[in-house]
Image (cartoon, rainbow, N blue to C red):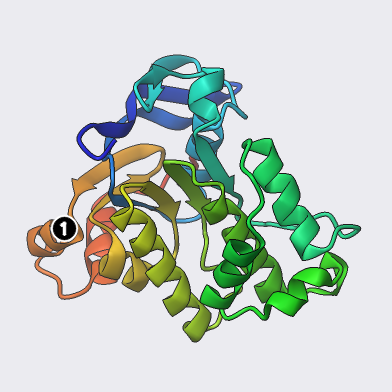
Amino acid sequence: MSQAQALCLESLHVSYGAFPAVRDVSLSVPGGAIYGLMGLNGAGKTTMIKAILGLRSWESGTIVADGSLLPDRLAKSRIAYLPERFDPPPFLKGREFIRFSLALYGRKEDPEAINQAARDMALDPAALDLSARTYSKGMRQKLGLIATLLTGCPLLILDEPMSGLDPRARALVKEALCKARGEGRTVFLSSHILGDMDEICDQVALLHQGRILYEGSPADLKKAEAQETLEKAFLSRIDRNPPNTAGD
């Protein structure tokens, strides 16, 4: 997979009635890379992710994942997704949720692998035997990340994966995502924490008002905008484009 494109969008257009949310978007996500999607609230990021996952229809364009034209059941079975507002079923224990997630992807349960994944996220494995309703926001987010990573899927789509995490947990998540990349897996993530994206992303795309303003490496965007940080380069690029009302 690392030798090909893990995900390609070609001239994708998504509307809500007469309102265009994603406008003629094309992008290419290399296999075995960490690819970041940047944008303000309302840029169209979540709409795009929903289209990729088959949760939102689109008017025109194509989406290809793992060499298959979406929607395709086999291709979708190779994609694991973590939403921005992740809330596990409160009636399940953490370990039960992970077991359920693994079963959805036909993966066997490995108790030691589950415990190690929890430790890697600074989550006491004993917490997995507690009801999810007792979890803090940070614990719920860690549980979602653990379950997503353990699926073994070659393409991970993560919407704001650092949400609700403290600095230490964020550092551990970044380590886990880099480890997934080292295994040849592809990580497609959106985040408002541009410093983290600058640190771990091989490529980024800047989505603004439903359109792609930039696709390439964080370093090249900083160079093009003559800025020292990705955040400043991001703001410099979007400030040259007038405001619109494209929806997220």
Picture quadrant where residue 238 is located: bottom left
Task: Name the residue nearer the viewer: 87 or 60.
Answer: 87
- Number of marks present in the image shown: 1
Quick check: 132 left or right of 186?
right
Residue positioned 61% across, 66% down in the render? 112
Q: Quadrant of the N terminus?
A: top left
Name, please, the residue furthest toward the right: 91
Mark 1: few/some/many CA within 10 Å (<14, 14-19, 20+): many
- Image location of residue 117, percent across then percent down: 56, 67
Task: Name the residue nearer the viewer: 194 or 115.
Answer: 115
Residue positioned 29% across, 47% down in the render? 205
Whether residue 19 is visible, yes or no, is no
- Image location of residue 183, percent across then percent down: 33, 53
Placement of 80 over or under 137, stated as above or below: above
Task: Name the residue nearer the viewer: 16 or 177.
Answer: 177
Residue positioned 81% across, 70% down in the render? 129
Placement of 199 over or under 35, stated as above or below: below
Quick check: 243 left or right of 245?
left
Q: Secondary structure at mark 1?
A: helix
Residue type at mark 1 is: Leu
- Image location of residue 203, percent across then percent down: 24, 51
Residue positioned 86% across, 58% down in the render? 92
Picture quadrant where residue 130 is located: bottom right
Whether residue 210 is visible, yes or no, is yes
Placement of 187 over or under 132, stated as above or below: above
State the residue position of label 1. Answer: 221
Picture quadrant where residue 192 is located: bottom left
